[in-house]
Image (cartoon, rainbow, N blue to C red):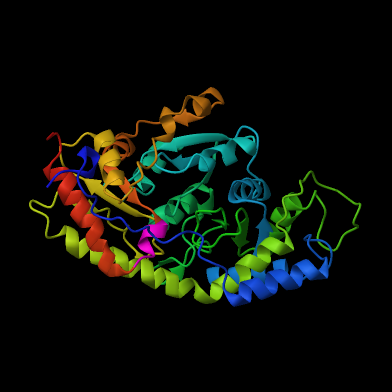
């Protein structure tokens, strides 16, 4: 059997599901209603942004939400509203999207990049402990790929040291930890609605929190320093216009009604692929396991660990030629010169370095296919790993 890269027939010739999926009738109707109302901005008297923030707060098990233009701004606003600022340090995991660190820089604080657990690749509580200094003000666990970070030890550590905790839940809409929704497990949580996410309006984000004083401070950051119920042109604090629009909210609000079904569909595909991979000789590819406590994985991505002597560039190129494209995943944040040049401090991160060399991703759109098509991923991996290096 010849690799498609070398002129053979690909494993899969049909396209994978597109993302985002087509608008459903309720989205189309609500977007049309907002467009025709002329109430497009968040401060013109429309109600959809308010309905969305209330719904997401309920989803997260907390009373308050603030909708923002994107999740990077949401992380920034959450940190600022919680009192994190110039000279403070915020601990972030090394294996995550760069915005986890740049949001800290935007708040005037110093990202401290620490290692992840070598098995499940989420923030390591021991690495957090080892990185603490007198300037540490907050910790930012990331619910990576849709599974829940192991929050109990992180929250306990933060409580002992008087630290704030901001969950980066950008990839974890609908995920749960010990049957409790992510986002509402700490001082604040932040979701993303960027184009690749499980719910999308092209861009957008949303902050949730449980404390009223924190909510009012975060709301002020996102609303030009105003105070809730205060004068419109009164700006007692420094703030910014970080608001989401009614049009974006109209795309998102109806999506909540189908989110659970879409999570179930992705989990079914992942379960099917795990069964397929178990049949590979010597099991050279395995699913990166969920952290302890994950009771619902929203499966934004499926992370695969490849324990085989294969050139990474060849693997990705050959899989794409077989019609089963994989993603290379994150480089360790500490290797990014742009971050360290801005003052980020990088601790040794061997687990993140290993993950960058051995872990690949199956994208969310592929996980939305019929679970029977998980066999395509396993077949292509078998073909490429078997024929690696052959002409």
Between residue 105 and residue 382, name the one nearer to us. Answer: 382
Q: Residue 155: image x %, image y %?
A: 46, 55
Residue at x 41% of width, y 64% of height: 298
Name the residue furthest left: 281
Q: Residue 16: image x %, image y %?
A: 38, 59
Residue 255 visible in rendering? yes
Tally of numbered tags: 0
Residue at x 59% of width, y 68% of height: 56
Which quadrant would the C terminus be assigned to in this image?
A: top left
Looking at the image, is 125 positioned above or below residue 337?
A: below
Left or right of 87 in this view: 224: right
Between residue 211 and residue 313, name the one nearer to us. Answer: 313
Looking at the image, is 172 positioned above or below residue 257?
A: above
Residue 178 visible in rendering? no
Residue 112 is covered by the magenta coloring: no
Residue at x 12% of width, y 52% of height: 283
Residue 6, by quadrant, is: top left
Residue 46, by quadrant, is: bottom right
Q: Residue 29: image x %, image y %?
A: 67, 75
Q: Residue 346: image x %, image y %?
A: 43, 30
Left or right of 376 in this view: 121: right
Between residue 125 and residue 120, name the one nearer to us. Answer: 120
Residue 193, by quadrant, is: bottom right
Q: Which residues are magenta?
A: 364-369
Magenta part mainly helix, strand or loop? Answer: helix
Residue at x 67% of width, y 68% of height: 250
């Amino acid at each position: 059997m010849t690799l498609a890269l070398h002129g053979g027939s690909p494993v899969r010739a049909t396209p994978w599901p597109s993302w985002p999926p087509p608008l459903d009738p309720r989205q189309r109707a609500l977007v049309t209603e907002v467009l025709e109302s002329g109430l497009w901005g968040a401060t013109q008297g429309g109600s959809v942004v308010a309905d969305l923030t209330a719904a997401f707060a309920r989803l997260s098990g907390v009373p308050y939400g603030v909708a923002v233009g994107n999740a990077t701004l949401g992380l920034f606003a959450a940190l600022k509203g919680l009192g994190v600022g110039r000279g403070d340090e915020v601990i972030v995991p090394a294996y995550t999207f760069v915005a986890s660190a740049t949001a800290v820089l935007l708040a005037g604080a110093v990202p401290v990049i620490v290692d992840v657990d070598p098995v499940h690749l989420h923030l390591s509580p021991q690495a957090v402990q080892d990185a603490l200094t007198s300037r540490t003000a907050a910790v930012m666990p990331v619910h990576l790929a849709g599974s829940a970070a192991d929050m109990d030890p992180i929250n306990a550590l933060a409580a002992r040291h008087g630290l704030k905790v901001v969950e980066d839940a950008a990839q974890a809409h609908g995920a749960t930890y010990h049957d409790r929704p992510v986002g509402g497990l700490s001082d604040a949580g932040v979701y993303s609605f960027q184009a690749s996410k499980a719910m999308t309006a092209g861009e957008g984000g949303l902050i949730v929190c449980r404390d009223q004083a924190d909510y009012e401070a975060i709301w002020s950051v996102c609303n030009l320093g105003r105070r809730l119920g205060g004068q419109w042109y009164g700006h007692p604090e420094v703030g910014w216009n970080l608001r989401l629009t009614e049009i974006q909210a109209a795309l998102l609000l109806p999506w909540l009604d189908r989110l659970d079904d879409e999570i179930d569909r992705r989990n079914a595909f992942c379960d099917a692929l795990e069964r397929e991979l178990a049949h590979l000789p010597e099991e050279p590819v395995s699913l990166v396991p969920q952290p302890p406590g994950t009771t619902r994985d929203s499966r934004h991505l499926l992370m695969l660990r490849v324990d085989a002597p294969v050139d990474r560039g060849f693997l990705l190129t050959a899989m794409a030629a077989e019609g089963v494209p994989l993603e290379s995943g994150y480089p360790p944040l500490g290797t990014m010169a742009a971050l360290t040049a801005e003052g980020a401090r990088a601790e040794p991160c061997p687990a993140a370095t290993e993950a960058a060399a051995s872990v690949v991703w199956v994208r969310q759109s592929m996980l939305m296919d019929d679970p029977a098509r998980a066999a395509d991923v396993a077949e292509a991996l078998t073909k490429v790993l078997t024929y690696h290096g052959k002409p």
